[in-house]
Image: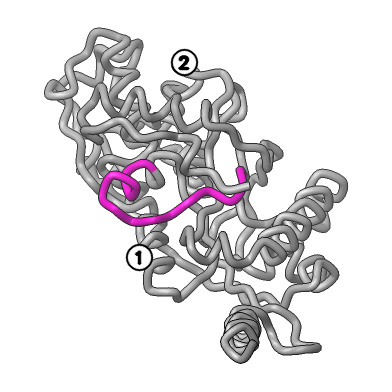
Amino acid sequence: MMHRMMGVLAAFGYCALAAPAWGQTPKLTIGYVPNAEFVPVFIAQEKGYFTKAGLDTTLTPIPIPSNVPAALTSRSIDVGPATAVNLLTTAENGLNLVAVSGYARNIVGKEPANIVVRSGVPYNSSRDLVGKRIGMAGVFSTFDVFFRIWLRNNNVAFDDVKEIDVNYPTMLNMLDNGLLDAAVVVDPFRTQIVNSGKGFIAADFIGEIAKDCVGLIWVANRDWATAHPAERAGFIAGLRDGIADVLQDRKGAEAVEAKYLKFSAPITDDFNLSLTPADLQFYQDFMLELGFIHQKINASELIIR
């Protein structure tokens, strides 16, 4: 009897450590990238949607998206944004991260990035990029995957272009100074380049490959995600309310965007919290083909429900 009682007490003690104290609101630290795609997160924080879902949330900016996995593994954040490419790469490298939700889709006609060519550089087809210097924010990134597949589909060898790893804020000046001939650009930098007259949109390289595919997802450490289903559910509930606000009140969303980012840029409406193994498998096939990863990964094991 004594051994049984000790076992019960030990189990209770473990649960007490794993759960928040009585009356204490669970804390959640959310990583985000400072751009317009995260306006629903700002709104959920600003209007108390996370609080309504039972969470005490802190928003932590991560300016460089590729640093999100490191922030998760160091426990600086609990959840953070990533792409399917990020998740698959970390899985092959032994980081035990999982997707807890979808977030945004790449939909043709609403492309998150374009190939922007410097004004004065002739462009009629992908062949015109041969020998050109192309700015890419992140080698082996999602956009890099699409760009390489797009070149292949258009019979241009990747080695025939000169891809240069640069960050988005420097692209305008590099195009203007002739250091780049073209760049793969997202907003607000895409709009700034076009409005300045320094470049023009040449191709929707993503839409030519996929009409609808997963863009951003939310990821977490597997052990945290397994131990905190209530926090995950509250996070998704708050996100859903924030997304609804963006879709229903664009002017209000732009005001929140300006408060958090100090500028306004086009806000996407391609939010979608669903995520399936097929969404991840779509990228895995390309990554294996390109040599970005070298072993097959069970996509279904990378999503936690």
Q: Is 225 displayed left or right of 293 in the figure?
A: right
Label 2 residue SS: loop
**Percent position (x, y) of residue 269?**
71, 39
Q: Amino acid at mark 2?
A: Glu
Label 1 residue SS: helix
Give the labeled residue for mark 1: 70
**Percent position (x, y) of residue 21?**
71, 89
Q: Amino acid at mark 1?
A: Ala
> Which label's residue is closer to the chain start, 1 or 2?
1
Which residue lies at the image location 69% right of the left edge and 64% below the top edge? 42
Q: Is 127 displayed left or right of 62 in the figure?
A: left
Q: Is 264 displayed left or right of 23 in the figure?
A: left
For the residues carrying marks 1 and 2, which lies nearer the camera in this image?
A: 1
- In which image quadrant can residue 262 be found? bottom right
Span shown in magenta: 88-102
Which residue lies at the image location 33% right of the left edge and 50% below the top edge? 90
Residue 93 lies within the magenta run: yes
Structural crowding at the residue carrying mark 1, measured as other residues with C-alpha within 10 Å and reported as few (<14), some (14–19) or many (≥20):
few
Which residue lies at the image location 30% right of the left edge and 30% below the top edge? 296
Work out how far the residue at label 1 is from the one at label 2, CA to CA, in angstroms.
32 Å
Which residue lies at the image location 22% right of the left edge and 13% below the top edge? 156
Give the labeled residue for mark 2: 208
Residue found at the far top of this picture = 155
Q: 209 or 87: nearer the eye?
A: 87
Q: Is 84 displayed left or right of 29 in the figure?
A: left
Quarter holding the N terminus is bottom right
